[in-house]
Image: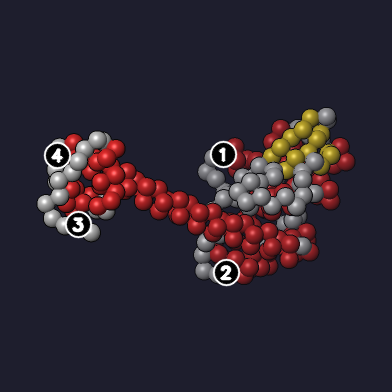
């Protein structure tokens, strides 16, 4: 499934480029309830080609000597201010429409097919349609990159979770063994109840200045 976070790279691709400053200005006006009309009053400062996993470069620009940094909000949301923002900035609403379609199609298709279908179905009156159709390959590459990053990050998280579980189990076993040692339980019983090896139990007992009694032979 496609990254459930909004598409940072695509957002920057649309709103952080020189040729799309009119959309950036529309977004700025919608956010700030302003009425600027000259796209050339915007100086784009968004960094390009920055691909750090898990770190995104949001849209950055200067207008009226003030720097603005925007991150994306791409899903249709019952929150009224968000809906009003999308109504006020037509390209933002169109962007949200595209991302929602990609998410829906990616449930049943691979990410490249999902992006292709979503672009093909962009309504003819969408302002962003000619740009996205003309940059289809780049759009697909960005979405695929984010999809692969999400898969990798999930793998890292799963590995970390498993390692955390392993460490937690080891700590619990050590705590149980320590309590049993302090209670003068025999070494073989401690091994049986904790799952620790004989060497580990003896080391733990040594750290507690205790000599264990072994009733049976434990390898």
Residue under the point 24% across and 35% down: 209
Q: How many marks?
A: 4
Residue under the point 27% across and 53% down: 197
Dot 2 falls on a residue whose secondary structure is loop
Distance, label 3 to label 2, CA atoms, is: 54 Å
- In the picture, residue 136 is in which quadrant? bottom right
**Of label 4 and label 2, which has the lower sequence position?**
2
Residue under the point 80% across and 35% down: 62
Dot 4 crowding, Cα within 10 Å, few <14, some 14–19, many 20+: some
Circle 4/circle 1 CB separation < 8 Å: no
Between 78 and 199, the one nearer to me in the picture = 199
Residue bearing mark 1: 80
Question: Where is residue 34 shown, x and y percent of the image?
Answer: 76, 32
Residue bearing mark 4: 184
Q: Nearer the viewer, mark 4 or mark 2?
A: 4
Label drawn at residue 110: 2
Dot 1 crowding, Cα within 10 Å, few <14, some 14–19, many 20+: few
**Of label 1 and label 3, which has the lower sequence position?**
1
Residue bearing mark 3: 218
Q: Nearer the viewer, mark 1 or mark 2?
A: 2
**Of label 4 and label 1, which has the lower sequence position?**
1
């Amino acid at each position: 499934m496609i990254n459930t976070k909004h598409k940072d790279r695509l957002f920057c691709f649309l709103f952080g480029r020189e040729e799309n400053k009119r959309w950036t200005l529309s977004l700025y006006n919608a956010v700030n309830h302003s009425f600027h009309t000259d796209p050339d009053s915007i100086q784009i400062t968004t960094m390009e080609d920055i691909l750090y996993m898990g770190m995104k470069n949001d849209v950055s620009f200067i207008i009226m000597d003030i720097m603005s940094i925007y991150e994306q909000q791409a899903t249709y949301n019952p929150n009224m201010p968000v809906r009003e923002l999308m109504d006020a900035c037509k390209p933002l609403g169109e962007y949200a429409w595209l991302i929602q379609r990609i998410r829906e199609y990616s449930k049943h298709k691979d990410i490249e097919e999902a992006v292709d279908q979503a672009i093909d179905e962009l309504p003819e009156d969408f302002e962003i349609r000619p740009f996205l159709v003309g940059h289809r390959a780049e759009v697909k590459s960005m979405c695929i990159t984010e999809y692969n990053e999400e898969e990798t990050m999930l793998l890292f998280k799963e590995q970390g979770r498993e390692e955390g579980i392993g460490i937690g189990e080891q700590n619990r076993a050590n705590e149980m063994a320590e309590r049993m040692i302090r209670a003068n339980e025999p070494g073989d019983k401690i091994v049986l109840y904790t799952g620790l090896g004989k060497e580990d139990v003896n080391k733990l007992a040594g750290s507690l200045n205790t000599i264990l009694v072994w009733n049976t032979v434990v390898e």
